[in-house]
């Protein structure tokens, strides 16, 4: 049976498949950052920002997160979520982005994170609100256009910091995490478009994916409910543990 179509004032039930997809991205993010931390402490020697395979994995993880951001925007519009709820969530993302910048400044100095994934998300969710009212086809077209623009246009006039966040710079800025507006907003717009098309099918989910009650699936769904908290906590915890391990090993 398809899921019931929400009315304009109804509360959209959580869709387990969306939490599962977000949880899968979170697990990959933690694994990627753990390998990064091992490199940071000198136990591995991997140029993760230079080797094509590692760059591709990082881009795949970011794409998964942002696709779910777009799906969430589309599903939220279908549920008629209030503006107050949206801006409360936006404030949490913006505050978390500020914390990341402050913490990264102490860790990386001039390579601090000033427009990473949370900074991007704070901007993207605002830009996504008007798009959520458009058709799926329009959003898919906008997403494809943003992807094409960001992947094909590179101009040195966009290199200065005041413009490099747009994503058209000829040279990547010196920062530990960089998620510019294009091409990445294209992934969000595609997610919004897919949500609109899914809404046309009353958010139906194939029967094998409706329950998702296995232990791994439940764990992934739980992780998928707390993406912002896990994003903020996982690195301090891992780096703290690795610092203790390094101290004990050196003693």
Image (cartoon, helix red, strand yellow):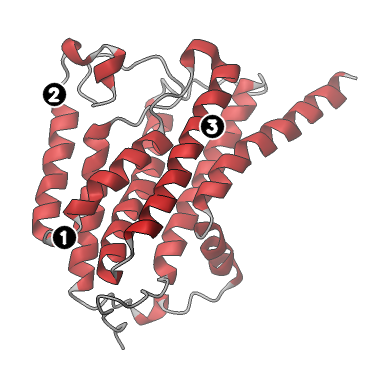
Residue 37 point in image, percent of width and height = 61, 28
Q: Nearer the viewer, mark 1 or mark 2?
A: 1
**Left or right for 179, reference 74:** right
> Where does the image place residue 63, in percent across and percent down from the top left?
34, 44
Tell me the distance, in whole angstroms, between the alpha carbons under discs 1 and 2: 28 Å
Circle 1 residues within 10 Å: few <14, some 14–19, many ≥20: some
Q: Nearer the viewer, residue 24 or 13?
A: 13
State the separation of the CA atoms marked 3 and 2: 31 Å
Label 3: state its secondary structure.
helix
Please report whichever mark, 3 or 2, sits nearer to the chain's N-terminal start: 3
Task: Say which quarter of the image contains residue 196.
Answer: bottom left
The C terminus lies in quadrant: top right
- Front of the two marks 3 and 2: 3
Q: Residue at x 50, y 42 (%)?
A: 29
Q: Which residue is mark 2?
A: 153
Q: Percent position (x, y) of residue 76?
A: 31, 63
Q: Earlier in the sequence, mark 1 or mark 3?
A: 3
**For the view shown, which residue lies furthest in the right direction?**
251
Does 88 appear above or below 185?
below
């Amino acid at each position: 049976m398809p899921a019931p179509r929400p009315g304009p004032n109804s509360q959209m039930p959580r869709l387990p498949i969306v939490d599962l997809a977000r949880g899968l991205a979170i697990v990959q993010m933690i694994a990627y950052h753990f390998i990064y931390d091992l490199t940071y402490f000198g136990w591995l020697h991997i140029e993760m920002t230079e080797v094509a395979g590692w760059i591709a994995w990082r881009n795949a993880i970011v794409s998964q997160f942002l696709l779910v951001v777009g799906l969430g925007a589309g599903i939220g519009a279908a549920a008629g979520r209030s503006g107050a709820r949206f801006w409360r969530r936006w404030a949490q993302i913006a505050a978390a982005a500020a914390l990341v910048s402050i913490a990264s400044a102490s860790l990386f100095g001039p390579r601090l994170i000033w427009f990473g994934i949370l900074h991007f998300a704070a901007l993207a969710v605002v830009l996504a609100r008007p798009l959520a009212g458009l058709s799926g086809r329009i959003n898919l077209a906008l997403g494809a256009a943003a992807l094409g623009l960001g992947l094909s246009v590179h101009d040195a006039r966009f290199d200065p910091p005041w413009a490099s966040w747009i994503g058209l710079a000829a040279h990547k800025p010196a920062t530990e995490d960089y998620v510019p507006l294009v091409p990445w907003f294209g992934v969000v717009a595609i997610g919004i478009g897919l949500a609109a098309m899914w809404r046309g099918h009353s958010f139906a989910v194939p029967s094998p994916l409706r329950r998702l009650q296995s232990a791994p699936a439940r764990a992934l769904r739980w992780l998928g409910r707390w993406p912002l908290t896990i994003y903020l906590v996982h690195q301090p915890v891992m780096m703290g543990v690795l610092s203790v391990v390094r101290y004990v090993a050196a003693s």
